[in-house]
Amino acid sequence: MSKAFIQTSDQDDKAIGIWLILVALVVFTMIMVGGATRLTQSGLSMVDWKPISGIIPPLSVEEWQAEFDAYRQYPEYKLINKGMSLDEFKSIFYWEYGHRVLGRLIGLIFFIPMMYFFIRKKVKPELKLPLIGLFILGGLQGLMGWYMVKSGLVSEPEVSHLRLTAHLTLALIIIAALCWVAWGLMRPQKLSQTAALPSGLYRLSWAIFGLIFIQLMLGALVAGLKAGFAYNTWPLMGAAFIPEGLYAFSPLWHSILDHTMTVQFNHRMVAYAVFLSVLGLVYYVHRHNMVAPIKQAAWIVFAAVCAQIIIGIFTLIYVVPVSLGVLHQGGGVLVMLSMLFFLHQCRR
């Protein structure tokens, strides 16, 4: 990805960078709405995927009734929401509808400006492939979203937690790539060209970023398995810090991916590891008396991690209310982006 950066400060690069940041903001909103859709149990309310005509919601009583009748044919209505009124159905329908409309909006606000920049020859050769790659990733994300929803339209009215994790992971990759490319265009000067940075700083930073990314994937597993609704105490899980019955499934990977207790325990432990790692990073940059932008970026990461841990604890002990659950999901994305910004500051 570093080859995609154009080491100039011309107005075209800045314009493209600002556009990519705006796209990233809409993607962030999409992630938050996705969290609300999941927590309000709205994700299976639209049982068809209509990429073009689906942009228009039901407008008449007859259209609403047809949409509701289609929903009533599937397990979520039969097993969970039997007897739901049409007005109650509308309240969950609009969350999923909003989520899908945002997805289409992202496609438009990416594709139309991209074509403008290409046609006007404002995109340097090194940047063309990354932009096309980002557009392809966006399309794949739409397909992944429908693949996830399909898993809940069969015998069990629950989407696959593994598909949900894949869906969120791809969203994280997209928003990270958008920001990385945008920052490279808007902040082309590398600090390593003007300030001496320890040789191990970049590798250490990537290791911490990898740990944070793993933690976000574990959070998606927690969400998919609804593991946050179990063991709603902290710092203990039930009566112990390390509860009995961990890693109960065999083989080991089965427990890591599918065992509710183990998934929540791993999410907690990696949170502690992230905190200690970032605290060590702050100490490292101060011990080596690095330049102010590096120190500031490290403190931003530390503040984001501390806030996220506090939100996570309250989300757990209050048994995952929608507001805190959405805030926790968004906070995780901000932690990742703050660490990515640190990496960008110290890139070579």
Image (tube, rainbow, N blue to C red):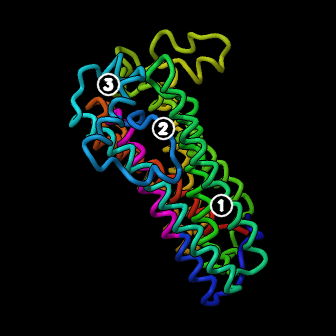
Q: Position of residue 320 (x, y in %)?
A: 31, 33
Q: Residue at x 62, y 53 (%)?
A: 139
Query: Which residue is the site of mark 3?
Result: 233
Q: Secondary structure at mark 3?
A: loop
- Say which quadrant the C terminus sits in: bottom right
Q: Position of residue 68 (x, y in %)?
A: 32, 33
**Mark 1 crowdedness (10 Å alpha carbons): few <14, some 14-19, many ≥20:** some
> Which three-letter amino acid code belongs to the residue tagged 1?
Leu
- Say which quadrant the N terminus sits in: bottom right
Label 2 close to label 3 by CB (< 8 Å) = no
Q: Main secondary structure of the magenta part?
A: helix
> Which three-letter amino acid code belongs to the residue tagged 3?
Thr
Between 217 and 202, the residue placed more toward the observer is 217
> Which three-letter amino acid code belongs to the residue tagged 2?
Asp
Name the mark on residue 134: 1
Label 2 close to label 1 by CB (< 8 Å) = no
Q: CA distance from mark 1 to mark 3?
A: 41 Å
> Is residue 222 visible to us here?
yes
The first of marks 2 and 1 along the sequence is: 2
Q: Quadrant of residue 86?
A: top left
Query: Which residue is the site of mark 2?
Result: 48
Q: Which residues are magenta?
A: 21-41
Label 1 close to label 3 by CB (< 8 Å) = no
Q: Is residue 208 magenta?
A: no
The first of marks 1 and 3 along the sequence is: 1
